[in-house]
Amino acid sequence: MCDELTKLKDQDLLNDLFTTAIEGGVSSWADVTAYDYSSDDWYATIETENLEEDAEGLVVYRIDEQTILNGIKLFAGQERKNPGSEFCRMGCFSDVLISTNGEINLFDDYGYDVVGADMIVQLGLFNQVVYG
């Protein structure tokens, strides 16, 4: 894992990634059914289509700090293993994920956007980016 992952103790960063995803990114593929960003145990629940083969109906997912942490760690690991992959090229659309020199850019001063925050949530929930 990337040494920068030690910065994951920054609760403001984690909460900001969470709110950016909930208020912008996930709305293209899910409906937010509950949302609390201001308490210590911040969370959201979303409802989206069931991704299992031949499954019908909607599924409810909970997004919380652990979801964000898992998503960041998965992205960092994938980017380091295969920086030229399609997955990582998708990340290039987000200022938060990859900087111009190809390094992970989650924690510098450039900020992040809804694309990056959404990718982090999808990785945290599904272990992959499902909605591109």
Image (cartoon, helix red, strand yellow):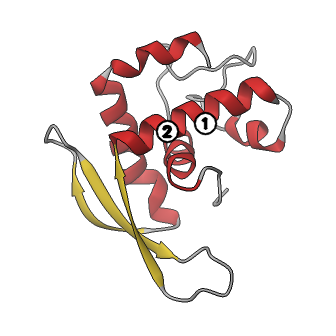
Q: Residue 33: x, y in percent? A: 29, 69
Q: Which residue is mark 2?
A: 70
Q: Amino acid at mark 1?
A: Leu
The dot on residue 123 is none
Q: Residue furthest left?
A: 39
Q: Residue at (57%, 45%) from the top-left corner?
A: 119
Where residue 93 appears, x then y in whole percent? 67, 38
Q: Residue furthest right?
A: 84
Where the N terminus falls, by quadrant?
top right
Residue at 13% x, 41% y is 39
Q: Which residue is mark 1?
A: 74
- The residue positioned 55% from the left and 39% from the top of the image is 116
- Which residue is situated farthest in the top direction here? 3
Q: Is residue 33 left or right of residue 73?
A: left
From the top left corner, tell me how far across and down residue 120 is, in percent. Answer: 53, 42
Circle 2 sits in a helix, a strand or a loop, which is it? helix
Quadrant placement of the C terminus: bottom right
| Cα gap from disc 1 to disc 2, whole angstroms | 6 Å
Marks 1 and 2: CB-CB under 8 Å? yes
Q: What is the quadrant of residue 17 in the picture?
A: top left
